[in-house]
Structure formats: structure tokens, C-alpha cells
Image (cartoon, rainbow, N blue to C red):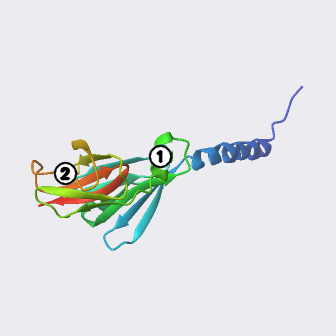
Amino acid sequence: MITRINFQSIKVMAAGFIFVFGAGIVSAQTTVKVTLLDNSEQNYAVVPDGKLWFDQGQFVINKDHDAAPITIPISTIRKITFGGDGDTSSVHELANDKTDIHIFPNPANDYFELKTAVSEKLLVRIYNTNGVLVASNTFANGDRVDISQLSLGIYVVVINNQSFKLIKQ
């Protein structure tokens, strides 16, 4: 007995399968919001196989393994925040952290101060433009963070999952 295979039906079933399971993949993406110095905002949807990194004064966003990387000069960035509906616990934690935190002065020479309304300790991590952690400690509202040992340049300061650009002069 010879059975004919209806390739059109297989294509329709395959498309439905990809749509149903592909929708689950799309919902796991994370939104990266970049606020520029002029307070304009740019949002990027980054899927689980996407990557973010710093390279030679640039913030690089690769939304997925097939997309061309997007580069944004760090010197134009005010803040980087993360959010999304993914099932990753760190994404959930970042999306719910709405604490208003300020660092000043910026640019800074030897230190910057922390200003926030929360009374809990703040985890402060400082990264250079290559993404290398150069300092980390916990501080409280009003504390001074000593940066005298850092070289002149641009740094990313991450405080309780919020990112800030810091200029060391």
C-alpha cells in the first residue's frame, strides 16, 4: 500500500507547533531600558540567548544570537534598567526593585555619596567599561563610597540592581 504524504498539512502543523512553542520563548525575554543623558529612553527586548556587555567605552546589546549587536556609547547613558515577564528569579527581582537611589557628585574625584529613602544596606558594585568588577561593598543612605583608588574614566555603578554611569575625574 502506497501512502501519499500531504506536505502542505505537515507545513501547517509545523508552523502551528513553532507558533505555540515559540510564543513561550518570546514571553521569557527581558526588556533592557537605556535612559540617555537627555532623558530619552530606548527599550530592547533581549531573549534568553541574547547577551549584554561593555566593550571599549560602549554598552553592547545582542538581542539574540542572530541579530547584529547594538552599540551605545557609555558616555551618553544616564541609567540602565532591566525588567520583563521572564521566569528567571533575578529578572523578577530587578523588575520589582523601584527604590529611588541617587549618587553625587558625578563626575567625582575621590568619593560619591549615596542618597535613598530606604534604611536597609545597599549593595554597591562598580564595574569598569570592560565589565570587570573593580569594587564591591555594602553601604547605607548618606555613606561616602571611596573611589580614590580607581583610575580616571567611566564606570558603571550597580546599586541594588539599578545601574548608574559614574565619571571618575
Check the picture and name the quadrant holding the N terminus: top right
Q: Visible in this render: residue 87?
A: yes
Residue 112 lies left or right of residue 26; in this view the side is left
Residue toward you, 49 or 90 = 90
Q: Which mark is residue 16?
A: none
Q: Name the N-terminal-most of marks 2 and 1.
A: 1
Residue position marked by numbered label 2 in the rendering: 145
Q: Position of residue 36 (x, y in %)?
A: 34, 68
Q: Nearer the viewer, mark 2 or mark 1?
A: 2
Q: Position of residue 80 (x, y in %)?
A: 37, 58
Q: Identify the amino acid type marked 2.
A: Val
Q: Which type of secondary structure does the marked residue at label 1 adopt?
A: helix
Q: Visible in this render: residue 66?
A: no
Residue position marked by numbered label 1 in the rendering: 93
What residue lies at 19% left-to-right and 57% top-to-bottom? 112
Pointers 2 and 1 in contact (CB under 8 A)? no
Residue 135 lies left or right of residue 164; in this view the side is left
Distance CA(mark 2)–CA(mark 1): 24 Å
Q: Which type of secondary structure does the marked residue at label 2 adopt?
A: strand
Residue toward you, 129 or 124 = 124
Query: How many numbered markers are drawn?
Result: 2
Q: Which residue in the rendered view is the most extreme toward the right?
A: 1
Residue toward you, 145 or 53 = 145
Residue toward you, 146 or 84 = 146
Residue 101 lies left or right of residue 47; in this view the side is left
Check the picture and name the quadrant holding the C terminus: bottom left
Could you classify mark 1 by the number of other residues whose Cα lies within 10 Å: few (under 14), some (14-19), or many (20 or more)?
A: some
